[in-house]
Amino acid sequence: MDKDLIDLTSELIRRRSITPEDSGCQEILCQHLKKCDFEIEDFPFADVKNFWAKRQGSDPNAAVFLFAGHTDVVPPGPENLWRFPPFDPVLEDGHLFGRGAADMKGSLAAMIIATERFTEKYPDHAGSIAFLITSDEEGPFINGTVRVVEALMERAERVDFCLVGEPSSSVHVGDTIKNGRRGSLSGSLHVNGHQGHVAYPDTSSNAIHLALPALDELAETIWDNGNDDFPSSSFQITSFESGSAENIIPGEARVKFNFRFSTEQTTDSLQQQVDTVLDNHQLDYELAWKLSGEPFLTKSGPLISATLECIEEVCGFQSQLSTAGGTSDGRFISKMSHELIELGPINKTIHKIDECVSVSDLSQLTDIYQLLLEKLIR
Ligand SMILES: [Zn+2]
């Protein structure tokens, strides 16, 4: 019964589409969409492949539902550690193994099959269905979704509801709907001291000793307590480099850190607080910032209500809303879509050796996606 779903997922896994390569995945998706009378527009930027596809509904005023996702995958790591070759999908014990099975070629297949079934059942559906697919989600996110969204917003393309197929589920498929994400802000700090001979500390100034108390204060700070929608903001030091030889007092220290932040903070408020701590410790420093994404949130509305109903119908339980986890392309699309959620397979094996997805989960996900179309744009 799920042969079409397994075949399409396997066909996608077989393509070695490591970011920013698409390796023909989008061609496969477009072939299916063309058969369902979608109009397809390619949006290539530099080495990244993207496309936008739309099937116009019969009522031009009815809602537009967007499926969004990515065809690229992270590298497999040492291939000899995999049970099966990572780009040669194998079905065993009801699980399909391969790089991208859960993140997110399985979801792409589920979106396509759900769309095929829906359009066959309701060829004159009122609302419109769209797809926005990129080959640069796992990479630098410069020429992917962010640029397509810019182009679409310029021509005032309408999107009411967006579902991103990122693997949101934790124990059972459908148990978690991501309705927002925390912001992500990185800092690169350079602390200056004064290099010298380790035997003569009086004439030098140890950059590690200077940096540590300030870093300790940053690490111990409670930034906020979160709110109803977000967990508290967190600060993590991600790298610390200094020193050259055991008889030299280091004259500089390089530190990298990252904030995942709630809507209780802004980029400005975090930057100011960090500056204050560093200044209070009288450090001589340079600090460069990189913002990966502001926090975003979809409050309760038709999309979330419909999704909760669909999951209850298909899976028989009440799903949870969550804003935890890493960033995704949702942060870009949320600028043009009234409501946006992420709903996909279990994320236990993503980016790992032996990534896999349960076929029955994918089948349920397809049913949920199809039901959502039926509830929102039929
Ligand atoms: Zn992903």
Image (spheres, grey):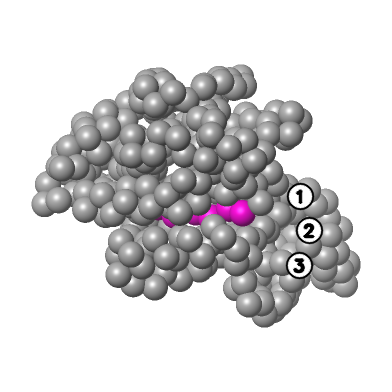
Report the front residue among 159 and 57.
57
Residue 253 location, x and y as percent?
71, 55
Residue 272 location, x and y as percent?
85, 64
CA distance separating discs 3 and 2: 7 Å
Q: Is residue 95 left or right of residue 276?
A: left
Give the quarter of the image for residue 33: top left
CA distance separating discs 1 and 3: 16 Å
Q: Are marks 1 and 2 in contact (CB under 8 Å)?
A: yes
Residue placed under numbered mark 1 in the picture: 289
| Residue lying at the far left of the rendered structure | 93
Quadrant into which the N terminus falls: top left
Instruction: Please tell me which residue is depicted at 58% across the width and 37% down the height of the picture.
Output: 59
Q: Is residue 340 magenta?
A: yes
The answer to whether 196 is drawn above or below residue 209 in the figure is above
- Numbered mark located on residue 265 in the image: 3
Circle 1 Cα neighbour tier, 10 Å, few/some/many (<14 / 14–19 / ≥20): some
Magenta-colored span = 339-344
Of the image marks 1 and 3, the number of the one nearer the N terminus: 3
Residue 105 location, x and y as percent?
36, 39
Report the front residue among 180 and 298.
298
The three-letter amino acid code for the residue at tag 2 is: Thr
Q: Are marks 3 and 2 in contact (CB under 8 Å)?
A: yes
CA distance separating discs 1 and 2: 10 Å
Of the image marks 1 and 2, the number of the one nearer the N terminus: 2
Mark whose residue sits in front, 1 or 3? 3
Mark whose residue sits in front, 1 or 2? 2
